Image (cartoon, rainbow, N blue to C red):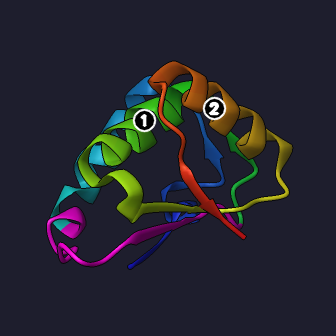
């Protein structure tokens, strides 16, 4: 399944908004089959803050593990945030080109 983060907005900031987005995504998350990955696409996202990403991506990483696939991005905000999350979670994300 592919998730385009842009559907949550172009500027993804604040812990509260990340938490709300994660709650809104729960019905879709339950539809993912056990053998299916979730491919997260950052296209169209201008800003991704560590707090928003921690509330949204960290729980997904805990639930899906390697089935969570982050599609690579040239966006420096996305790259810096993912680096922070890897250090905070002590787990690498599965990042694909």
Q: Which mark is residue 46?
A: none
Count every numbered label the image shows and give the total. Answer: 2
Quarter of the figure with the N terminus: bottom left
For disc 2, the marked residue is: 49
Q: Residue at x 49, y 56 (%)?
A: 8
Task: Quadrant for residue 35, please give it.
Answer: bottom left
**Of the pair 81 and 24, the residue shown nearer to us:** 81
Mark 2, other Cα within 10 Å: few <14 / some 14–19 / many ≥20: some
Mark 1, other Cα within 10 Å: few <14 / some 14–19 / many ≥20: some
Residue 24 lies, in percent from the top left, at 26, 53
N-term mark: 1 or 2: 1
Residue 34 lies, in percent from the top left, at 18, 72
Q: Residue at x 29, y 55 (%)?
A: 64
For disc 1, the marked residue is: 17
Residue 91 lies, in percent from the top left, at 47, 34
The local secondary structure at tag 1 comes to helix
In the picture, measured across the screen, residue 71 lies left or right of residue 79, that is left
Q: Residue furthest top?
A: 88
The local secondary structure at tag 2 comes to loop
Span shown in magenta: 28-43
Select label 1 or label 2 by which is in front: 2
Q: Residue at x 30, y 78 (%)?
A: 36
Q: CA distance from mark 1 to mark 2?
A: 11 Å
Quarter of the figure with the C terminus: bottom right
Q: Residue at x 40, y 57 (%)?
A: 66
In the picture, measured across the screen, residue 23 lies left or right of residue 70, that is left
Residue 82 lies, in percent from the top left, at 64, 38
Question: Disc 1, disc 2: CB below 8 Å?
Answer: no
Dominant secondary structure, magenta: loop
Residue 39 drawn in magenta: yes
Residue 64 drawn in magenta: no
């Amino acid at each position: 399944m592919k998730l385009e983060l842009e559907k949550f907005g172009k500027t993804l900031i604040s812990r509260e908004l990340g938490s709300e987005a994660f709650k809104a995504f729960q019905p879709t998350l339950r539809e993912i089959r056990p053998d299916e990955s979730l491919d997260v696409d950052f296209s169209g996202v201008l800003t991704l803050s560590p707090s928003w990403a921690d509330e949204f991506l960290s729980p997904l990483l805990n639930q899906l593990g390697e089935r969570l696939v982050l599609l690579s991005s040239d966006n420096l905000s996305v790259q810096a945030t993912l680096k922070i999350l890897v250090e905070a979670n002590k787990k690498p994300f599965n990042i694909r080109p």
